[in-house]
Image (tube, rainbow, N blue to C red):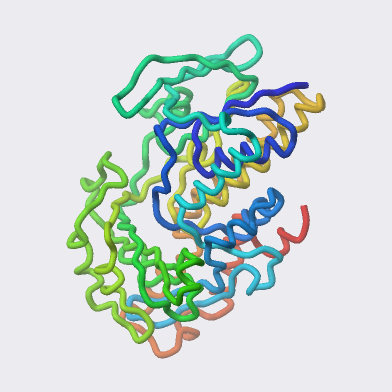
Amino acid sequence: MNIKVGIVGAGIGGLTLALMLHQRGITCEVWESATELRPLGVGINLLPHAVRELAELRIDALLADIAIETSALAYYNRHGQPIWQEARGRAAGYDWPQFSVHRGEFQMLLARIVERRLGPDTVQTGLRAEGCEAAARGVTVTLRERDSEGEGRTQQRTVDVLVAADGIHSAIRRQTHPPERDPLRFAGRMLWRATTEAAPYLDGRTMFMAGHQDQKFVAYPISEPARRKGRSLVNWIAELRVSPESLHDDWNRVVPRSLFDHAFAGWHWDWIDIPALIAGAEAVYEFPMVDKDPLPRWTAGRLTLLGDAAHPMYPIGSNGSAQAILDARCLADCLEQAAHGRMTPEHALLEYEAERLPRTAAIVLRNRLNGPEQVMQLAHERAPGGYSDIDAVIPRAELEGIALRYKRLAGFDRQSLGGR
């Protein structure tokens, strides 16, 4: 059975899905609202279960050329005292690494590979999805043409299957799940994100988090080319509790560091100078920490959702991009069954939803409880003034249990990754 898939959104999830469909002999097109793809954003982490999927697409070596292979994850309290540290990726015995990379550079890498393997017309920019409706044997999507001068006429495309991978503000999700019944949920915390070139800290490949849920700083290096030169391009996130009125619609806006830098003025320890990192950034971007309640369904006929369009989650546990990649793998496998006539496309989408919806819903809800980062909150609540012995505050078995439970939930514990 010949199946043509339309993908709304040329982000990480949409481009990965295109590569996976092509690998299985399924035709697709990708429609992107931006008039051109540019390397926007800051850092992301790709955990071993996601890197395994990228390795099967034969792009892990290309990723390794631009990304840092993360060696460890370390947690500290707001005084700079260690709470918990664990090896990551191959350093922890996995068959696949964990990578930290600039999101925009990774997206552009995927776009180049899609163009090379699927053809230059596969990703079509300047087309914003405005809605869709069921067709006789598929889905018809309405696309608004956009260029540097503004917006133009609409056009319609009909495909056998439509996948909305257009992010947390998905127009397709708004149609199937109206915003008044599917609102954004604000955590009451604001994130300020940036990158700073600096001297390497620790081993030059460690990700660290410090503080607690209302005052937190996260940093990790994201550039292998910078590391080869003896420098470190550090992605960092400062997070503070703010008033509910702070939620705004102007996402990804550049703001002055004076909004938050005073809260971290004393965070200068013998191995890291956090005020210097903050001061060294060229531009700081502001993001409210939001998610949405898990949906009862993603699929309607031959339409389904993927990635942030399906399950927006707090950026906790380094799982957003990884779960979009896992969505793409599962959906491509199900559509392959439909392409071979073993099930209908409608059945294939329901199989995908049955596998992925409950898994991602659990992560969304666990991230609201701080996921694996709850170790910092426990240390703060039990010993706000600091400690001389972390084992007396949080026993090692408790720390190990928190880390392992989240890995199992998200699907990247070593036992789960031992085989398909």
Residue at point 53%, 54% (across, down): 319
Point 55% across, 31% down: residue: 30
Give x and y (percent) for residue 228. Answer: 50, 73
On screen, residue 154 above or below 68: above
Percent position (x, y) of residue 54?
65, 52
Relative horizontal placement of residue 277, taking residue 390 as reference (left or right):
left
Query: In terms of image quadrants, where is residue 230?
Result: bottom left
Residue at position x 37%, y 46% in the image:
290
**271 or 173: nearer the eye?**
271
At 47% from the left edge and 64% from the top edge, which residue is drawn?
223
In the image, is 136 to the left or to the right of 172? right
Q: Position of residue 168 (x, y in %)?
A: 43, 38
| Residue 7 horizontal/vertical position (percent) | 56, 30
Tell me where residue 385 sits by quadrant.
bottom left
Q: Quadrant of residue 250?
A: top left
- The quadrant in which the N terminus is found is top right
Q: Nearer the viewer, residue 298 or 143?
A: 143
